[in-house]
Image (spheres, grey):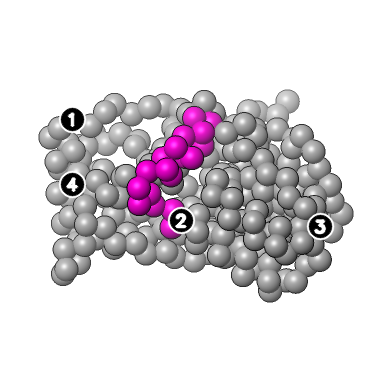
Amino acid sequence: MTEAPPLIFSPVRRRSRHARIAGLQRREHAARYVIDDMIAEIAERLAFVRREPGAAAVVGDWTGDLAAYLERSGHAITRFDAATLDEELPWPTGEFDLVVSLGTLDTVNDLPGALVHVRQALAPRGMAIATMVGGASLGKLRRAMQEADGDRPAARMHPLVDPRSAPGLLQRAGWSNPVVDTQRLTVRYSSLDVLVADLRAQGLGQVLASVPPPLTRAACERARAAFMAQADADGKVSETFEIVTLTGGR
């Protein structure tokens, strides 16, 4: 009997987070730089491999920009809503020439199983691309949260995929010709509150199954001070997002 994966992420909170993104994006000057970077990376990758257009499935494309790009390239698009698609189950339809997941697979409890389902949704010789925020991301925010909690730190940020383990995951999932690439996106912040607002607007808040206790007012002030203590000479903090891109086929 196969042992069930540990429940790290809450499926309910995960779906709710994806469902809220459209509303958050309607706010003036809402951040979207992480998904923009992911889409640019995927477009560059597809231009390099020069695949013939075909049936393409896209999940997590809440801006619609990737679907529009693929349509202009001649693909027939099926868009899946990340708020309703359970990526830990087989996809409802299959035989896609291209499957793209934008920033959704880093919060599934059974990542190897989800990667199997992506591969099974492909047609023979189909191609899959999955992007996500990787483990080297948000180091300064993590340090600030640790300072806020002091000697009794709570799990306030969810674990992220280590790209060094990704090749093994793809091999276990049966992806052919697996490739794992990483790139760094650096964004500068004038305060911790701006960073937190940006993360929420982009659907990057934590969705842990075990919800940590709320920060007290004093802890919030410690977090703000610890974050700004890492500022550059101009008073802004340079924070890093590691973007991990997984590519392979059936």
CA separation, marks 1 and 3?
Answer: 53 Å
Which residue matches tag 1? 216
Real-space CA distance between mark 4 and mark 1, rounded to the nearest whole angstrom: 12 Å
Of residue 94 and residue 154, the one placed in the foreground of this image is 94
- Cα gap from disc 4 to disc 2, whole angstroms: 23 Å
Q: Quadrant of the N terminus?
A: top right
Identify the residue at image location x=32%, y=59%: 239
Which residue is the site of mark 3? 54
Q: Are marks 1 and 3 in contact (CB under 8 Å)?
A: no
What residue span does the magenta drawing correspond to? 14-33
Q: Earlier in the sequence, mark 4 or mark 2?
A: 2
State which quadrant residue 177 falls in: bottom right
Estimate the spatial distance between the alpha carbons at disc 3 and disc 2, rounded to whole Å.
27 Å
Q: Which residue is mark 2?
A: 34
Q: Is residue 140 left or right of residue 204?
A: left
In primary-sequence order, the first of circles 3 and 2 is 2
**Tag 4–tag 2 contact (CB < 8 Å):** no
Q: Which residue is mark 4?
A: 224
- The residue mark sitting in front, 3 or 4, is 3
> Residue 105 in magenta?
no
Precedes in sequence: disc 3 or disc 4: 3
Q: Residue at x 64, y 56 (%)?
A: 68
Callout 3, which amino acid?
Gly
Q: Nearer the viewer, mark 1 or mark 3?
A: 3
Residue type, label 4: Arg
Sequence-wise first label, 4 or 1: 1
**Mark 1: secondary structure:** loop
Q: Are marks 3 and 4 in contact (CB under 8 Å)?
A: no
Q: Nearer the viewer, mark 3 or mark 2?
A: 3
